[in-house]
Amino acid sequence: MKRLVAFVFLGTAVSAAAAAPRAHEAAASVITELTACKAVADNAARLACYDAAAGKLAEATAKGDVKIIDREDIRATRRSLFGFELPHVAFFKGDDTAADTPSEIDTTIKAIGGQAYGKFTITMDDDAVWQTTEPLPRDPRIGMKVHLKRGALGNYFMTVGSMRSVRAQRVR
């Protein structure tokens, strides 16, 4: 139970903008009802309260109004988003894994696209696409190890194999 963190999604991507507040309110109501049950003094009434709230929670989960994800899913999501500036959204509200956001990662080159002036578009093994903003001293090759590190002021540095570090930006 400690490993589970509940997050409320404001509707699916295809939901109309007007439906999002209703989905959020419904999900918040389900969570509020569930937590209110612990204040019921009578054992039988408390059990009935929990049963009713659990039924509503199961229904909201089946409809997609409520999603339950564990910390490992959050860490994997944060790792997959490395290189993008994350907006402050309710998805991460109450999330204490922010300290787990990596400041550097190691990966491998899956595909390479050349750009002008010695710059490259590089697809990593996790399908993240990075573009060097400075020329590399040598051409990279598929299968080479890459080290990506967050720098100051939104910069990222890419080290391909044993080459010197160059600035890079995540494009996809």
Image (cartoon, helix red, strand yellow):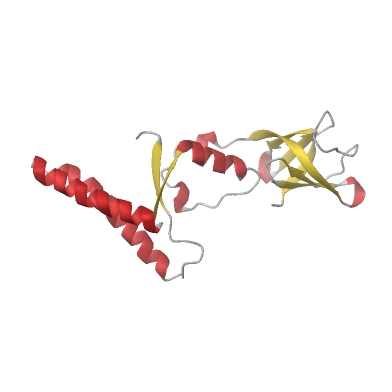
Tell whether 20 sits left or right of 53. Answer: right
- Identify the image quadrant of residue 160: top right
- Residue pushed farthest left? 42
Q: Residue 126 appears in which quarter of the rendering?
A: top right
Q: Position of residue 37 (x, y in %)?
A: 19, 46
* Spot occupied by residue 172 in the image (x, y as percentages of width and height): 69, 52
Q: Is residue 63 left or right of residue 104?
A: left
**Residue 30, percent from left and from top:** 28, 54
Residue 88 percent coordinates (x, y): 50, 51
- Of residues 92 and 27, the one nearer the viewer is 27
Residue at 70% over, 43% down: 155
> Of residues 37 and 169, which is closer to you in this image?
37
Q: Quadrant of the N terminus?
A: top left
Q: Residue at x 60, y 35 (%)?
A: 102
Q: Pick the residue in front: 96 or 122.
A: 122
Quadrant of residue 23 in the image?
bottom left
Q: Residue, x 51% and y 63% (percent of image)?
A: 13
